Image (cartoon, rainbow, N blue to C red):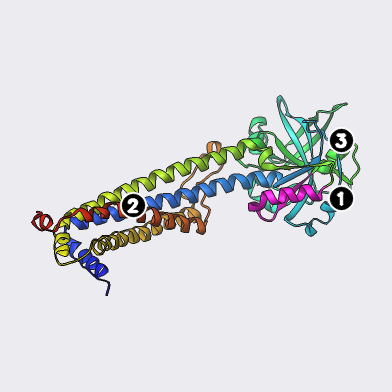
């Protein structure tokens, strides 16, 4: 039998009604709350980041392919849709889906109200499943085979500015030479919460954009590429550069909307600081708690040394004691964090202001590898911290310890 473990268990059982029991509970609570806070923070952070990214990706894909040009306007040269990477995209590595689009700037008017917009022409290849959750009212565009559809989907922000509602008719003036206008019908209203889209983008039929630009049906302004694994963005970018023609430009959407993605990266730094503070506090509490336990058991330490116990044997007693404390804290902390996470995930009890947070409730993203990593990190950090107070056992003198009161 391991004598250190045996004595440690006896100490725990004997402490149930002592001052040490209170200290023990404080230690367990400190670790449990610290771990629970870290896990919940990361679940929310990952959920927040993924929600924002998915909104950006659903509108623009993971990559955009367009004609290489130094022109920064929305009016760019068209690309043939007969290229192999578009017609046979399923044969290409990393690529999950490709859809065509065309952009045209314009002025949307309703009576005396006017706002600048970007008309984004899309076709039947548009992946509605990714976008449908942001459609808050009405229906999506009904495409027609022979003529262009007059249906458009606008944002709640544009609808608010122009006092529009479903089935209203609006006039859009397209900025070109000569200027042209079209009467369109509001088929649906969307909301992403992202200003880059909600304040200016309306969705319509790409056939209308082609007709205004005098383009044939076989061309588009560009292509939006969705990849299979977002974690392999760099590899996919290099691959697309190699398989597309030299006259085409492949742009990562994270660069296109760098303000959003740089802001998300800044959140990572804040969480690292937050994590460091929590681990520091938990480690400091652990040192204090084990020191108190050692001081309360000074008499016992002196007796064990007098009976021939080595410093290593006595250290292991308190390491086992501290380890049991850590284990209880980890179990309780995980139960608290996962329990609260499941409640928010399924019932969405905590709301958010969409204007400030770009979403209506606190998001939860389950990342079990991250949860396991936080548990291991807590064990390693606090395990190393445990050896700081137990090192003082070597300085305890048996005679003075036996007399210690």
User: Badge 1 local density, few (<14 within 10 Å), some, or many (20+)?
Assistant: few
Q: Main secondary structure of the magenta part?
A: helix
Q: Which residue is mark 1?
A: 83
Give the quadrant of the C terminus.
bottom left
Q: Residue 72's image quarter? A: top right
Q: Which residue is mark 2?
A: 385
* Magenta-drawn stretch contains 227: yes
User: For the point 29% across and 60% down, which residue is it?
Assistant: 319
Front disc: 3 or 2: 2
* Dot 3 and dot 2 residues touching (CB under 8 Å): no
Left or right: 385 as drawn, with respect to 220: left
x then y, percent, for residue 153: 72, 42
Which quadrant is home to the N terminus?
bottom left
Asked if residue 70 is among those painted magenta in the image, a careful observer would answer no
- In terms of secondary structure, where does tag 1 sit? loop
325 or 51: nearer the viewer = 325
Sequence-earlier tag: 3 or 2? 3
Q: CA distance from mark 2 to mark 1?
A: 61 Å
Badge 3: how crowded within 10 Å, few (<14), some, or many (20+)?
Answer: some
**Between discs 2 and 1, the one toward the N terminus:** 1
What's the magenta region?
223-244
Horizontal side of residue 53 vs 392, given as left or right: right
Disc 3, disc 1: CB below 8 Å? no
Specify whether 365 is left or right of 175: left
Instruction: Looking at the picture, tell me which residue is in the foreground, 1 or 95.
Output: 1
Q: Residue at x 82, y 52 (%)?
A: 85
Instruction: Tell me the quarter of the picture where residue 67 sits.
Output: top right
Residue beneath label 3, please? 212
Judge depth for marks 3 and 1 and give the one in front: 1
């Amino acid at each position: 039998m391991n004598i250190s473990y045996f004595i440690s268990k006896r100490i725990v059982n004997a402490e149930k009604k002592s001052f040490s029991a209170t200290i023990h509970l404080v230690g367990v609570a400190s670790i449990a709350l610290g771990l629970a806070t870290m896990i919940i923070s990361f679940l929310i952070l990952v959920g927040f980041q993924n929600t924002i990214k998915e909104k950006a990706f659903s509108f623009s894909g993971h990559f955009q392919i367009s004609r290489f040009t130094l022109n920064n306007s929305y009016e760019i040269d068209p690309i043939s849709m007969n290229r192999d990477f578009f017609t046979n995209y399923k044969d290409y590595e990393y690529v999950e889906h490709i859809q065509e689009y065309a952009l045209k700037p314009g002025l949307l008017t309703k009576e005396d109200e006017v706002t600048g917009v970007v008309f984004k022409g899309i076709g039947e290849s548009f992946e509605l499943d990714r976008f449908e959750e942001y459609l808050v009212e009405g229906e999506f565009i009904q495409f027609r085979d022979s003529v262009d559809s007059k249906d458009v989907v606008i944002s709640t922000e544009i609808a608010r500015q122009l006092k529009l509602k479903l089935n209203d008719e609006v006039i859009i003036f397209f900025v070109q030479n000569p200027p042209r206008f079209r009467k369109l019908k509001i088929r649906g209203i969307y909301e992403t919460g992202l200003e880059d889209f909600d304040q200016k983008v309306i969705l319509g039929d790409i056939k209308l954009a082609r007709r205004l630009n005098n383009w044939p049906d076989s061309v588009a302004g560009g292509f939006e590429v969705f990849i299979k694994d977002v974690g392999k963005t760099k590899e996919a970018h290099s691959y697309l550069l190699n398989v597309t023609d030299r006259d085409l430009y492949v742009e990562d959407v994270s660069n296109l909307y760098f303000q959003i993605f740089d802001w998300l990266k800044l959140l990572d730094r804040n969480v690292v600081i937050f994590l460091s503070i929590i681990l520091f506090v938990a480690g400091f509490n652990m040192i204090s708690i084990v020191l108190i336990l050692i001081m309360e058991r000074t008499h016992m330490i002196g007796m064990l040394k007098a009976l021939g116990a080595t410093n290593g044997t006595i250290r292991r007693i308190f390491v086992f004691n501290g380890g049991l404390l850590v284990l209880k804290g980890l179990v309780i902390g995980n139960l608290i964090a996962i329990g609260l996470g499941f409640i928010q995930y399924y019932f969405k009890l905590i709301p958010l202001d969409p204007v400030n947070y770009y979403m209506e409730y606190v998001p939860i993203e389950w990342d079990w590898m991250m949860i396991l990593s936080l548990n291991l990190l807590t064990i390693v950090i606090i395990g190393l911290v445990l050896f700081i107070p137990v090192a003082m056992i070597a300085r305890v003198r048996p005679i003075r310890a036996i007399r210690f009161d």
